Amino acid sequence: MTKKHHNTRNNSQHKSRTKRLGKKLAKQLRPWHRRLGIFCALFIMLMAITGVVINHSNHLSIDSAPVQQAWLLDYYGITPANKLAIYQTQPLSLASSDNLVWVRHRLAVEADSPIKGMLTLGKMILAVDSNNLYMVSQDGELMEKQDASMGLPRGIEAIGFDGQVWLKTQGGYFMADDDLIEWTQAMPFASIPWSQTLDTQAAQAESDTISLLARSSHLTWERVILDIHSGRFFGSLGPWFMDLVALSLIIMAISGIYLWVQGRPKKKARVPRY
């Protein structure tokens, strides 16, 4: 056998071995390629759906839609308010949770500090925290906010009404004029009916509703969907899991190209014409 024939035979054997190894590798990759495809498809659909929803969150109103599912609020670690007070159930609901004022189950005011008291004055609702007076309509709209720059005393502890609006503060008692503009320090001649919280069955049922509303005010559906989209919803390992999905997509793309190359029909060698 000549040296040329020997080299040709070796090349042929090498190509044959390479071809067999390629087919064997393709046979091993094919089932894993399918499994990775199914695994990735589920998360691609999830990310695509959440991405579309996020892009249209304003039109779908999920940017302001509160989450009211208790289990989901528990999952996010949103606990009930430390101080929940029901001041009125009829003819309209008046309540506070920490620094939030609720009118007709609607968030009306986010005060600077915990609410000290609430009462109705005609068609207006008055609420106070330590240093501010909030005037709210019966529809839950903030009409005016007073503070020390407008003459309101500091260190408010309670609000009451006996024909005039009174404030009990750390520095004494203050009485408002009829327009709630000027506050004069004075000593009441009789005991003032200070704003009190209710402790009735209706108030207990109302407190459950307000407690859920207060918790849900801290979480919107937009936040939940954003967390699902980024993987943060699944905890500290969520982003790593999404990285695993991305790595699976890369492997699937590479294996897909390899399988396509292996399965591509070979071009027939052209027969030279003479």
Image: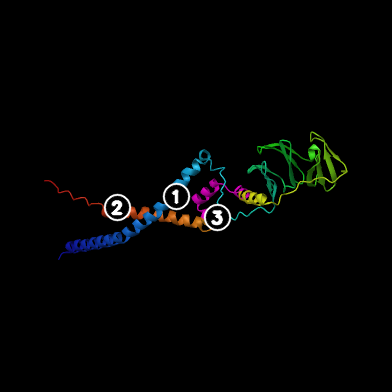
Ranked by sequence position, the earlier of labels 2 and 1 is: 1
Q: What amino acid type is highlighted by mark number 3?
A: Trp
Residue 115 horizontal/vertical position (percent): 72, 47
Location of residue 124 in the rendering, given as x and y in whole percent from the top left corner: 72, 37
Disc 3 target residue: 71
Residue shown at the point (52%, 51%) measured from the top left: 227
Q: Dot 2: few (<14), some (14–19), or many (≥20) neighbours within 10 Å?
A: few
- Tell me the residue at 46%/43% (across/down): 52
Q: Earlier in the sequence, mark 3 or mark 2?
A: 3
Q: Position of residue 252 (x, y in %)?
A: 37, 54
Q: Earlier in the sequence, mark 1 or mark 3?
A: 1
Using the numbered discs, state the Cα–Cα distance from disc 3 to disc 2 in whole angstroms: 47 Å
Q: Nearer the viewer, residue 158 or 191?
A: 191
In this view, the residue in front, 216 or 257, is 216
Closer to the camera, 138 or 36?
138
Is residue 47 in view from this perspective? yes
Q: CA distance from mark 1 to mark 3?
A: 21 Å
| Cβ–Cβ under 8 Å for marks 3 and 2 | no
Task: Using a 10 Å C-alpha cutoff, classify the residue at mark 1 as few (fewer than 14 neighbours), some (14 to 19) or many (20 or more).
Answer: few
| Residue 12 located left or right of residue 55 | left
Q: Is residue 124 left or right of residue 236?
A: right
Magenta-tinted stretch: 213-233
SS for dot 2: helix
Q: Residue furthest bottom?
A: 1
Tag 3 secondary structure: helix
> What residue would you read off at disc 1?
46
Label 1: element kind: helix
Q: Which residue is mark 2?
A: 260
Q: Position of residue 263 (x, y in %)?
A: 26, 54
- Left or right, 268 with respect to 178, comes to left
